[in-house]
Image (tube, rainbow, N blue to C red):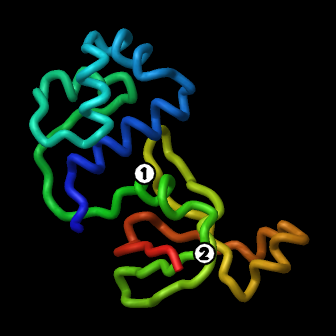
Amino acid sequence: MAKTYDNYISNFVKYNRSKLRITQEELAEKAGVGLRFIRELEQGKETLRMDKVNQVLALFGYQVVPGGGRIKDPYEILLDHFNRNVHVYLKNKNVLVGFLIEAINEGAEVKAWKFVSNKNAIEYQKTKDEKLEQIIAHSDIENVENI
């Protein structure tokens, strides 16, 4: 099933709400929208009022604007693939096998990932040696799949 921007927004809101450790009720109150709207937004409902979506996103410093290009949802990666054994498919057609161990943020936006290959995973687990880490720009990722 292809991911849509609706999924991207719902994952973004869920991730940032949990990062701030606030409830759906608190988010609704801060954004000036109803609790039902927040629930529908986080569930990925496809027909929502954009002005209300932007009210919620404004709390995180974002808004919905027209744009192009399909991008891999960083919040999907955090929710579904973080600290799991994965294949990381890069846009240059290389495939990495290992673990995404940390998101590198710039503000509220994920810009890159720290990655440890399966080859180095046991040694990294023992030593936490940063030389075993690889930095992957989020913009270089085409897809991520759990193994």
Residue in the foreground of this view, choosing between 142 and 24? 24
Residue 78, placed above or below residue 25 = below
Relative to residue 146, is residue 84 drawn left or right?
A: right
Relative to residue 52, is residue 22 drawn left or right?
A: right
Q: How far across and down, in percent of the image, does residue 21 sit?
A: 56, 26
Q: Amino acid at mark 1?
A: Tyr
Q: Amino acid at mark 2?
A: Asn
Residue in the foreground of this view, choosing between 45 and 19? 45
Q: How far across and down, in percent of the image, does residue 12 sit?
A: 37, 42
Q: How far across and down, in percent of the image, does residue 13 sit?
A: 37, 36
Q: Are marks 2 and 1 in contact (CB under 8 Å)?
A: no
Q: Secondary structure at mark 2?
A: strand
Dividing the picture into quarters, in which one does residue 58 lie?
top left
Q: Which residue is mark 2?
A: 85
Q: Residues within 10 Å of mark 1 (few under 14, many from 20)?
A: many
Give the residue at x 81% y 73%. 124
Q: How far across and down, in percent of the image, does residue 75 sit?
A: 42, 51
Residue 4, placed above or below residue 65 = below
Give the residue at x 19% y 37%. 64
Dividing the picture into quarters, in which one does residue 57 lie?
top left
Q: Residues within 10 Å of mark 2 (few under 14, many from 20)?
A: some
Q: Which residue is mark 1?
A: 75
Give the residue at x 41% y 22%. 24
Residue in the foreground of this view, choosing between 80 and 90? 80
